[in-house]
Image (spheres, rainbow, N blue to C red):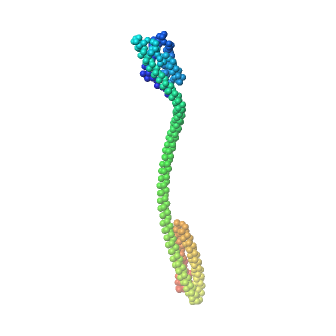
Amino acid sequence: MPDFAPFDSASAADTASQKSALDIDSALSSPRTAQPPQSTNTRDSVQERLLSPNPSSNEMSTTTTLLESSPIFSDSTPWVGGTGLGNANLGKSGRVIEKLMAENDKLKREIKAEAAKREELQRTANAQKPRLEALQAENARLSHCKAVDESVIKRRDRKIEDLKAELDIERQKRESLEHRAQEAERKMGEHQEHSNKEVQLAIEEAKHATTHASILETSHRQLSSEYRQRIAAASKQLRDLNDDREEDRKRLIKLDVVNHQMRQESEKARKLYNELLASSDRYREAKDSEVDLVLGDIRELKGGISHREMKLESTLEEMHETLNRMKWLMNMQKVNSENGVNSPPPSPPS
């Protein structure tokens, strides 16, 4: 409930004048007045009630009753229009008293007006009291909410600081991971480039090996064809030699020893020829199978060609050596037949 403001200086001056008038009235009261004297305590209590900042309704009603019943605050005074002294008989003090009584009446009216205002203000304050209490309760609730909000804000601030620290840690981790990812990507690019070079090199080597295998296959076919032609020519020569030997046997009937020796040599030559022929067949079959294996290995593998080439060259050298021995043997038989030499031929050249 709001406090009422005290009276201003003018009101205080009027109150002082009122007290003076009351004192003068009490002092100058005569036996002719029918009104009893007003005590100073009563007047003081009335003034204190009127001047109190928060007068109650009972006090306001009591004060109003006292004012109305007081001879000082009544509408009729014994000094004005009464049975007292007349205006002609009044002296200087009477005029002063009359003036004071007029001021007293004025102050009385002002006090009544102030009392009415106080009552109105009291009623207004009583009407506003529930609203004030509601506002005070709302203020208390809002103060409590403010304290709760401040504690929540402090907790949120601490949580925000923690989240900022976690965010910094996560940012550092992310930067580290990005750096590692870039490094891994760079290494992967280098490895990919190196792998591409190796694959390109392997493709070139495979092409080279395939070309070399094709060349070897073509060369082997040419050599096989040449060997077959030479073997066919050798077979024809052998048949011619057999015919010549039959004719020589007829001519050398008389030369039994020579014939016997020549027969033995012929048997040896035939045996050697059969062995050479069998060796040539075995060699051809072995070489065909080896060539097939070599071609298969070339298709499946990328390496090992040099070893195959060395082996093939060594086999070719053996074939050339065997062929040279066959030629030498046939030439020796032919020479012996033509010269009539019955000695066995020397060992073929190595």
Q: Could you say which is closer to the camera, residue 15 or residue 32?
A: 32
Q: Could you say which is closer to the camera, residue 178 or residue 253?
A: 178
Q: Could you say which is closer to the camera, residue 38 or residue 208?
A: 38
Residue found at x 54% / y 73%: 315
Residue found at x 47% / y 55%: 186
Q: Residue 146, how many percent across, how many down?
A: 51, 35
Residue found at x 53% / y 78%: 225
Q: Residue 35, how many percent across, how many down?
A: 50, 14
Q: Residue 55, how many percent across, how many down?
A: 51, 23
Q: Does residue 142 appear anywhere in the picture?
A: yes
Q: Residue 10, how many percent across, how many down?
A: 42, 21
Residue 134 lies, with reference to residue 107, above or below; the image says below
Quarter of the image holding residue 239? bottom right
Q: Could you say which is closer to the camera, residue 20 or residue 136?
A: 20
Residue 13 lies, with reference to residue 340, above or below; the image says above
Residue 305 lies, with reference to residue 91, above or below; the image says below
Q: Does residue 23 appear anywhere in the picture?
A: no
